[in-house]
Image (cartoon, grey):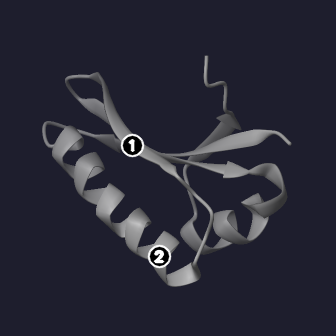
Amino acid sequence: MRKLKLIWDFHGPDALKTAEHHISHLKTYISLEKLNVTITDFEALNELHAIAFMVVDEFDMKPIRDALRPHRGQVYNDK
């Protein structure tokens, strides 16, 4: 089964801190909904752009996407 990376983009001088904080909200949602999601993380793309993301099974993506409204998504490649 394909895995999809749901991505939230944050911009500005506090982007990295905001992305890091967003992970706590994602983890809360995962716990409350009892989801089988083990990959959540954040990263800086540059000094003014950071992302928070979670990796989900393609089969489970639609209800998660509709509830959390990520900015974008892509096929997850763990290599």
> On the picture, is 62 further left or further right than 66?
right
Residue 17 image offset from top left, x and y in percent: 17, 46
Query: Eyeballing the image, is 15 above or below 25?
Result: above
Query: Eyeballing the image, is 18 above or below 16?
Result: below
- The residue at the point 61 percent across, 25 percent down is 78
- The residue at the point 61 percent across, 70 percent down is 35
- Identify which residue, 71 or 33, lies in the foreground: 33
Mark nearest the camera among 1 and 2 is: 2
Residue carrying label 2: 31
Mark 2 Cα-neighbour bin, 10 Å: few <14, some 14–19, many ≥20? few
Q: Can you tell which mark lies on residue 25?
A: none
Residue carrying label 1: 41
Q: Earlier in the sequence, mark 1 or mark 2?
A: 2
Mark 1 Cα-neighbour bin, 10 Å: few <14, some 14–19, many ≥20? some
Q: What is the C-alpha distance between the residues marked 1 and 2?
A: 15 Å
Viewport quadrant of the C terminus? top right
Q: Secondary structure at mark 1?
A: strand
| Three-letter code for the amino acid on which mark 2 is drawn | Ser
- Identify which residue, 61 or 33, lies in the foreground: 33
Residue 42 image offset from top left, x and y in percent: 35, 40
Query: Eyeballing the image, is 33 above or below 25?
Result: below
Viewport quadrant of the N terminus? top right
The quarter of the displayed image where residue 60 is located: bottom right
